[in-house]
Amino acid sequence: MIQSEMVVHRDGDLLAAAAAARLVTALVDAQAARGSASLVLTGGRTGTAVLAHLRDSPARDAVDWSRVDLYWGDERFLPSGHPDRNETQARAAFLDHVPVSPERVHVVEPSDGRFGDDPDAAADAYADVLAAAAAQAEGDGSVPAFDVCLLGVGEEGHTASIFPDSPAVHETERTVVAVRDCPKPPPTRVSLTLPAIRRSVQVWLMTTGESKADAVASVFGGAGEVALPAAGARGQRRTLWLLDAGAAAKVSEERTSRQA
Ligand SMILES: O=C1O[C@H](COP(=O)(O)O)[C@@H](O)[C@H](O)[C@H]1O
């Protein structure tokens, strides 16, 4: 298995700026190689801060946003336009400010959408979206090989909406699942599963603050994915943890690569 890499930035703002710069490079490289790129977005404070930095960076125009397929690693199952939907936050922070192709913005159906208040149907529909994209891009498979999958990490080690010891973390077949009774509000969500996330070429886990330090240290201490789902999020070629000093505070010094 490829070892996870870790980069530690001084604070969350610098992390977000550096991650935005990395993202430009990764997407430009993917487009140079294949003509298009695919990116999985995350919700949460750090993920949204990265998008805000990307919006404000002149380098963002190096990416042809009309040829980027955008997906979400998880979505809070709420009505369309609800301020807590990850989609709403990503649109406000970034998507409303760049010339993306609407047909390439692959959202999870909201709770007032085509399937009404049925998160299982919304999850199945999103799995179909992924399978269709995989068939188009790679000829087969149930999930595209996303160029970059951005993920956040919760205090208790959740990533996407895969919570510790929940049905979602035990899922081995399905690529997208409905998640109920989440310990963090809102209680109902739709999430990619770990097998789907692991189809990504690169997975970047981004988190900040001392409240995340125990979870991060446990992952680097060898905790398993059932107890700490973030430990099971890995890319085919690269698994990169982008942390600020607070989140990295309890990881042993020799494991971190300190950066300004
Ligand atoms: O609820 C969620 O939280 C996590 C982490 O969020 P943060 O605010 O602690 O950075 C995020 O990864 C996930 O996408 C989101 O739905």
Image (cartoon, rainbow, N blue to C red):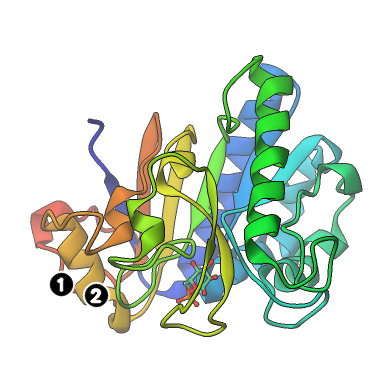
Asked if the residues shown at circle 2 and circle 1 are in contact, with their CB atoms under 8 angstroms apart, the answer is: yes
Confirm whether residue 63 shows in the render: no
Neighbour tally class for label 2: few under 14, some 14-19, many 20 plus, Cα within 10 Å: many
Q: Is residue 190 above or below residue 66?
A: below
Q: What quarter of the picture does the N terminus occupy?
A: top left
For mark 2, give the secondary structure: helix
Name which residue type carries label 2: Ala
Name which residue type carries label 1: Lys
Neighbour tally class for label 1: few under 14, some 14-19, many 20 plus, Cα within 10 Å: some
Q: Nearer the viewer, residue 228 or 218?
A: 228
For mark 1, give the secondary structure: loop
Snapshot quadrant of residue 41:
bottom right
Residue at the spot 39% in from the left edge and 29% down from the top edge: 237
Residue bearing mark 2: 213
Q: Position of residue 238 (x, y in %)?
A: 38, 36
Q: Position of residue 232 (x, y in %)?
A: 30, 49
Q: Position of residue 145 (x, y in %)?
A: 55, 30
Confirm whether residue 176 shows in the render: yes
Q: Is residue 126 above or below residue 182?
A: above
Q: Is residue 95 above or below residue 182?
A: above
Q: In the rendered view, does 99 fall on the left or right side of 131?
A: right
Q: Position of residue 114 (x, y in %)?
A: 85, 61
Q: Nearer the viewer, residue 175 or 157?
A: 175
Q: Earlier in the sequence, mark 2 or mark 1?
A: 2
Q: In the rendered view, does 254 fall on the left or right side of 208?
A: left
For marks 2 and 1, give the CA distance.
6 Å
Residue bearing mark 1: 250
